[in-house]
Image: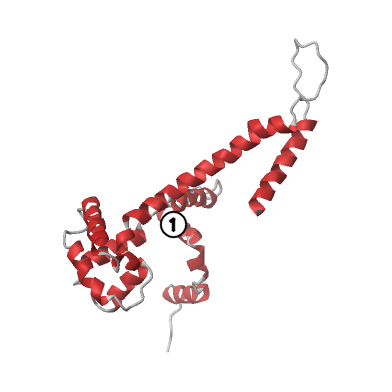
Amino acid sequence: MQATWQLNGVFQLMTKWLAKKKARLFFDEIDGDRRMNITQDNFKIKVFLPIVDTIICQLKDRFKGLHNVCTIFNFLKPQTLLGPDEITIKGSYDFIQMYQSDISSDLTSQLLSIKEIIKNKNLNSIQALASFILENDFATSYSDILGACIIYLTLPVTVATAERSFSKLKIIKSYLRNSIGQERLSNISVLNIEQRRTKEIDMDKILTNFSNMKARKMKFD
């Protein structure tokens, strides 16, 4: 609802601006100064609605990747894993064909084996399944399941993080910092991109340790 109000507000402002804007007069035209003949309905049909349609289509394309990932890894969810064996077997076969270099053909048998173990564990996500395997030292017995969970948890759905990294590089390496080295630039970029983790770092402790390492004072008896 709030987004609709904002779009309507933008539409009203652009309509008022176009109503006041004067048309450009060329040297070979006889007509004098005149205002642009653009009505509100004409602007809505030719400008406003196409922009809204473009935004909606782009949002749908953004979520297609997330939907495909959820479909591929659906068999790995504990809720699906505790369901009929046919769904687990079919999903695991398709997954093995897609990740042949990372997952072996033992994935199906491991899924059917772990089904009885997690039956009463109340696991609600793939991340919880991976944590359960690691906490109970089942990584060796169910290595393929753990590998599939790691692929799911580390699979990037969008490239927003990479695009944000390039945006940060332009801010960090400005004209005044043109002589900055590659290693230092990479380290500063990581600190800037991961701001949540950076804020948790105790800078006073780091500075104290660094000053103690670089101290040149000599102790005399």
Please identify the residue farthest to the bottom as the structure is shown. 221
What residue appears at the point 27 percent right and 64 percent down from the top-left corner? 84
Can you give x and y, in whole percent of width and height, for residue 211 in the image?
A: 47, 74
What residue appears at the point 37 percent right and 56 percent down from the top-left corner? 70
In which image quadrant can residue 190 be found? bottom left
Left or right of 80, for residue 203: right
User: Is residue 36 depicted above or below 75 in this figure?
Assistant: above
Please identify the residue farthest to the right as the structure is shown. 32
Can you give x and y, in whole percent of width and height, for residue 32 in the image?
A: 83, 16
User: Pointer 1: what residue?
Assistant: 184
Per the image, label 1 sits on a secondary structure element best described as helix
User: Is residue 132 depicted above or below 109 in this figure?
Assistant: below
Which quadrant, please, contains the C terminus?
A: bottom left
Q: Which sits in the foreground, 81 or 216?
A: 81
Can you give x and y, in whole percent of width and height, for residue 117 in the image?
A: 25, 76
What residue appears at the point 68 percent right and 34 percent down from the top-left corner? 44
